[in-house]
Image (cartoon, grey):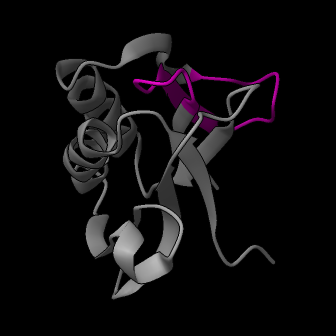
Amino acid sequence: MIDHTGATVSDFERSKQFYTTVLASIGYELIVHFPASKTGRTDVAGFGENGKPDFWIYKGEPNDPPVHVAFRVSSQQLVRLFHQTALDAGARDNGPPGPRSHYHEGYYGAFVLDPDGHNIEAVFHAS
């Protein structure tokens, strides 16, 4: 079971604002921010829900190749809201909301590229 994951970003403040805005659309919030003076290495920020950060961004040289992170949501409506919020926040479209039956029946997702080109997805799995 995965406990947490993350991505390295080139412009920490820009990405922190991007993720704060975009992830709020699916119920995530910025839970913690540690400056480099505290970590001894670099600025980090953790996002999640219910007080538990499980998605982290780190200031530095962006991952190459970029990473793919998918956030599971509870409805197709949240997939669409995530996608539109991300586009409004400056993301690039990497796949509009819709069914992706080639993954499996009931898979409904949307993909965006964050400011560093990381492929960020919201996905709903219908029962």
The image position of residue 23, as x and y in percent, is: 31, 51
Of residue 17 and residue 39, the one placed in the foreground of this image is 39
Of residue 33 and residue 30, the one placed in the foreground of this image is 33
Q: As displayed, is residue 42 above or below residue 103?
A: below
Query: In the image, 60: left or right of 51?
Result: right
Q: As displayed, is residue 41 above or below residue 70?
A: below
| Residue 25 visible in image | yes
Splitting the image into 4 quarters, where does residue 97 fall? top left
Query: In the image, 88: left or right of 96?
Result: left
Splitting the image into 4 quarters, where does residue 86 fall? top left
Count of marks, rendered view = 0
Residue shown at 75%/35% (left/top)? Answer: 105
Q: Quadrant of the N terminus?
A: bottom right
Residue shown at 33%/70% (left/top)? Answer: 35
Q: As displayed, is residue 58 above or below residue 122?
A: below
Of residue 124 and residue 122, the one placed in the foreground of this image is 122
Residue shown at 31%/64% (left/top)? Answer: 28
Q: Is residue 2 magenta?
A: no
- The residues colored magenta run 99-119
Query: In the image, 86: left or right of 56?
Result: left
Residue shown at 49%/24% (left/top)? Answer: 116
Splitting the image into 4 quarters, where does residue 121 fall? top right
Q: As displayed, is residue 13 above or below residue 14?
A: below
Of residue 111 and residue 46, the one placed in the foreground of this image is 46
The image position of residue 13, as x and y in percent, is: 25, 44
Q: Quadrant of the C terminus?
A: bottom right
The image position of residue 61, as x and y in percent, is: 59, 35
Name, please, the residue furthest toward the bottom.
51
